Image (cartoon, grey):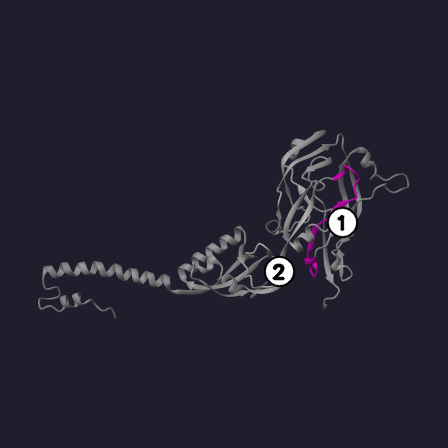
Amino acid sequence: MLKLPATLRQQFSGSRGIFGSRQNIVSFFKTLALVVPLTLLIWIYAQRAQVGGPVAVQITMDVKIDSPNQTASLMEPANGQVTIEIQGPTASIERLKATLVDVSRESRLRVSIPPTYPLGDSAVPVASLLNDYALIKSSGVTVLAAMPQSVKVRLESVATRYVPVMAPPAGALPFTAINPIFDPHVVKVTGATSILNRLFPTPADGVVVDLPNPESFNSPGAKQADSVPVRLHPLRVQPGDEDRVTIDTPRLTSFRFDVAALDEEWQIRSMPIEIKKPSPLEGRTVVTLARNTVTNVLVRGPAASIRQLQPRANEPPLVIPTAVLRIALEDVGRSDIRRAVEITNLPQGVTMVGMPPEIDFSVQDLGATP
């Protein structure tokens, strides 16, 4: 029951009726003008402060570690999708939910991993991790649970390598670049050891030139491009790699090359697929391909080089290219992989036209329990 203020009770109990006098009437309405808004404010505040939830929200997360000597990678779930249950003031829940959905739509929530975890793979509880995330912590909302309850995180030491600069992959340019000269021809890259091993499996593997406006160079003769950016190899890079690998020289001083005149095209009807695995996977995995060859690969190059690819009378071509499929450590146990092959062993000056073919394949661990 609402209890009237003392001044109102006195006015109601006066001997001259409810108000007693004109002065009491004025005083009554003045008091009412103060009490009613204050009561409404208290009610509104109580509604907003009322605890709501739990409310389920799906987010896309990633991980990082605030250490110059380590890197953090989210291994599972690979897509970063996690469903969390949050509880807190109703208004705060609605604001936070909208913000989390917007951030997840644009990119990923990059959550810091505590430095107490050891190097290697660890199961990290999602709820405690997100409750320390600044956006959630400052909202007054609590993460009660998550599905999955924990994520698999890999912490690694930062490694440094010097890798060569390479011409763009076959088919990336509308012409054949001959005798490329890069300044500098070697750059330093820094990142997690496992990522560098995948991106640069041999000393011959490196970063590639990202030539801007390549159409402007599409005429025979000597060419030079200055301040040319370099990037990770597009056939090996995976989502998130460019955030975890630093190229210390992101632009070359110059890139000089010759454009061949009178290029010819030739369609290679079929070429075998060669599987290349990291040494830890040799002998303990089986790779099953959807098909064993790639077909109808269009190449372009100087006439003399193209002739090396063409069959001779009752004899095979002088040069037989190969489609190389590179297997990564992360592929083990997966059956739904699709990846582009690399066309290798082409004659000098010959490049592929268009994008490289993609192959569906699976990788079975022979030591795993069926």
The residues bearing labels 1 and 2 have C-alpha atoms spaced at a distance of 28 Å
For numbered disc 1, what is the local secondary structure?
A: strand
What x and y, as percent, mark residue 100? 49, 56
Query: Label 2 belongs to which residue?
Result: 154
Q: Which residues are magenta?
A: 329-351
> Image quadrant for the N terminus?
bottom left
Looking at the rendered structure, the kind of residue marked 1 is Val
Residue 324 disc label = 1
> Image quadrant for the C terminus?
bottom right
Looking at the rendered structure, the kind of residue marked 2 is Arg
What x and y, as percent, mark residue 254? 65, 35
The residue sitting at 10% across, 66% down in the picture is 17
Q: Is residue 335 visible?
A: no
Left of 37 or right of it: where is 227? right
Q: Earlier in the sequence, mark 1 or mark 2?
A: 2
For numbered disc 2, what is the local secondary structure?
A: strand
The label nearer to you, 1 versus 2, is: 2
